[in-house]
Image: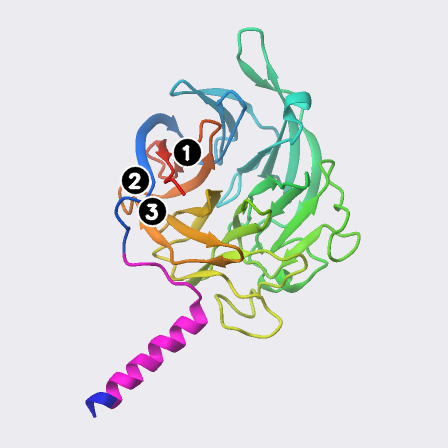
Amino acid sequence: MVRAKIAAACLVVLLLAACTGNAPGAGPSPGNGPELLRKLDLNLALPWSIVFLGDGTGIVSERDTKLIKSIRDGQATTVGDFPGVVPGGEGGLLGLALSPTFARDRLLYAYFTAASDNRVSRVRLEQAGDGRLGLGTPELVFSGIPKAATHNGGRIRFGPDGFLYVGTGDAQQPEQAQDRNALGGKILRLTPDGKPAPGNPFGNTPVYSYGHRNVQGLAWDASGRLWESEFGPDVNDELNLIEPGGNYGWPRVTGAPGRPGYIDAKVVWPSTADASPSGLEIVNGTAFVVALRGQRLWTVPLSGDTAGTPVAYLTGRYGRLRDVSLAPDGTLWVLSNNENPDFALVLKPPHP
C-alpha cells in the first residue's frame, strides 16, 4: 500500500512537470547571482520602461503622470509631458525604445494608451547647449491596437534586424489573440515608419506571432533568438521563445501542455503569486525577468533554444518590480512599481 501511494505521488509529479515546462527553483544558488550595487531614490511615480543613451543617461516613462524623465548622476529630471496619453487602469505611457540610428536622428519611440486605442509614436529627443533634454513634436507611427482597463501589453523594442517589435495584450477580448487579422494578443513586427516589416510570416500584415495574453517583456539572446515574458491568467505565467508565425495558445491553452498546433512555453510559473513577469533582459546567456506580484528578480539560464530552472533573487525586499534594462556600463537597472514613491536598483550581473 505504501509503495502504491509513493508511485502514485511520483506519477502526479511527473505529469505536472510535463505540463508546466521548467518550474522555478526553491532558492538562489550562492555566489552566482546578481549583486546589488546601489539603490537610487529617484521619487519616480509608477515608472514603466527605461532605456539608455550612449552616455549612460536613463530615459524613463511614467505610466500615469504621462511624463518622460531622465536619470543622470543619481537624479531624475522631467524631460517633458508626452502628448495624447490617456491613463486609466493598466494603460498610460508604457514602453520606450530608441531608434537604431539614434546617434543620427535622436528618435525616441513610445507605446501609449490614447483616447480610443493603444498606439506607438516617435519624438525627437532634443538636447540644449547646457545638456538639458526636451521633447520635440510627436509623430504617429502605428495605431489601432485595442485598449481596455487591463491587458494593454506595451513593451516595444528594436530587434537586431532593425525592425520594431511591439507586444500587445488581448484587451480583455481573449479570442482575438487567435485571430490573425486582429492586433490584440500579438507580437507585431514593423518598419521604423510603422509599416509591416518585410518577411513577416503572414504576408503584408504586422503580425509576427499570436496567441498571447498580455506581452510584457521582449529581449534577444546573443544568437538573435527572440524571447518574451507574458502574464498568465490565475496560473501559468510564461517565458517563451518566439518563432515567426508561432501560435502560443491563448486562450485555448496556457503553459506547456504539449498540445499539437500550439507552442509550449520554455518556462512556466504555475503560481502567478511567484511571478506576474514584466520586463525582460538577456545578458551573458541569462534571462533576467522582473516580477510584479512575485516581487522578485528571476534569473533563467539559456542554452540554445532551451531554458534552465529559474532562480529567484531580491524576493520581497523591494516590492513590485516593473522593468530591467542593461546600461552602457554593463550594469542592470531595475525599476520598482510601488507608488510609494518609486526607485531604481543598480545591479552587477553575474559573470558567465
Q: Residues within 10 Å of mark 2 (few under 14, many from 20)?
A: some
The kind of residue on which mark 2 rests is: Tyr
The kind of residue on which mark 3 rests is: Arg
In the image, residue 123 lies at what x, y percent? 65, 26
In the image, residue 131 lies at what x, y percent? 53, 11
Residue at mark 3: 296
- Quarter of the image where the N terminus is located: bottom left
What residue appears at the point 62 percent right and 71 percent down from the top-left corner?
261
Q: Earlier in the sequence, mark 1 or mark 3?
A: 3
Q: State whether residue 297 is above or below residue 239.
A: above
Membership of 175 in magenta stretch: no
Q: Earlier in the sequence, mark 2 or mark 1?
A: 2
Q: State whether residue 124 is above or below residue 45.
A: above
Q: Quadrant of residue 185?
A: bottom right
In front here: 208 or 86?
A: 208
Residue at mark 2: 318
- Quarter of the image where the C terminus is located: top left
Q: State whether residue 305 is above or below residue 8.
A: above
**Residue 195 shows which numbered tag?**
none
The kind of residue on which mark 1 rests is: Trp
Q: Regarding mark 1 in the picture, which secondary structure is present there?
A: strand
Residue at mark 1: 333
Range drawn in magenta: 4-26
The count of marks equals 3
What residue appears at the point 36 percent right and 40 percent down from the top-left corner?
350
Q: Earlier in the sequence, mark 2 or mark 3?
A: 3
- State the CA–CA distance, disc 1 to disc 3: 14 Å
